[in-house]
Amino acid sequence: MRFIYILVSVFLLFACGANEKPTQTNMDLIIELEDMARKDQTISLVQVNDEFKRMRDSLIEVNTSRLKEIIDEHGFTGTHLVGNSGSRKAMLIALHSNDEDFKNEYLELLEEAVEEGDANPEDLKVMKEKMGLEN
């Protein structure tokens, strides 16, 4: 009888996702977002000349395009999909985008995700502050 109880408990534990680990796809997305954000952060620290600014804008455009693709393919890059770190990296990529429409769309998705518990409220606060929407 005890064996059945343990078996049912283990089944319920995994069926409810209590120990849910990111899938390989999610891990791939996390790694990709971290790489994109690392490049974004590195290139945004230096502003040397027009050539460098063109390179920076090109990287930002590539990152924005890829983040849009990820969202279209997998849904919002919230904590359930890519964990806290990946979600933060996606927010930073969106924040640095030169596409204001996308930035506003991402902000709306982020607000919804925070309400649903799928994003860190601190990320929303940072994005609003950087966009000049909150004091």
Image (tube, rainbow, N blue to C red):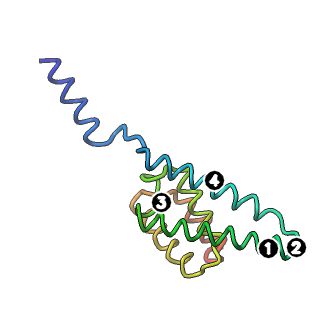
- Give 68 or 91, whichever is nearer the viewer: 68
Looking at the picture, how far across and down is residue 56, in whole percent? 74, 69
Which residue is the extreme one toward the top?
2
- Lateral position of residue 71 relative to residue 2, left or right: right
Disc on res. 77: 3
Disc 2 residue crowd, few under 14, some 14–19, many 20+, Cα 10 Å: few
- Give 15 or 1, whichever is nearer the viewer: 15
Earlier in the chain: of badge 3 and badge 2, it is 2
Q: Identify residue type, mark 4.
A: Asp
The residue indicated by pointer 4 is 35
| Mark 4 vs 3: CB contact within 8 A | no
| Mark 2 vs 1: CB contact within 8 A | yes
Residue at horizontal 37%, vertical 41%? 20
Q: Secondary structure at mark 3?
A: loop
- Lateral position of residue 4 relative to residue 86, left or right: left
The residue indicated by pointer 2 is 49
- Give 14 or 37, whichever is nearer the viewer: 37
The residue indicated by pointer 1 is 53
Earlier in the chain: of badge 1 and badge 3, it is 1
Looking at the picture, how far across and down is residue 109, in whole percent? 46, 70
Disc 1 residue crowd, few under 14, some 14–19, many 20+, Cα 10 Å: some
Q: CA distance from mark 1 to mark 4?
A: 20 Å
Q: Secondary structure at mark 2?
A: loop
Q: Nearer the viewer, mark 1 or mark 3?
A: 1
Looking at the picture, how far across and down is residue 117, in whole percent? 42, 57
Q: Quadrant of residue 36?
A: bottom right
Earlier in the chain: of badge 4 and badge 3, it is 4
Q: Is residue 114 above or below residue 128?
A: above
| The C terminus, quarter of image | bottom right
Q: CA distance from mark 4 to mark 2?
A: 24 Å
Q: CA distance from mark 4 to mark 3?
A: 15 Å
Residue at horizontal 62%, vertical 74%? 134
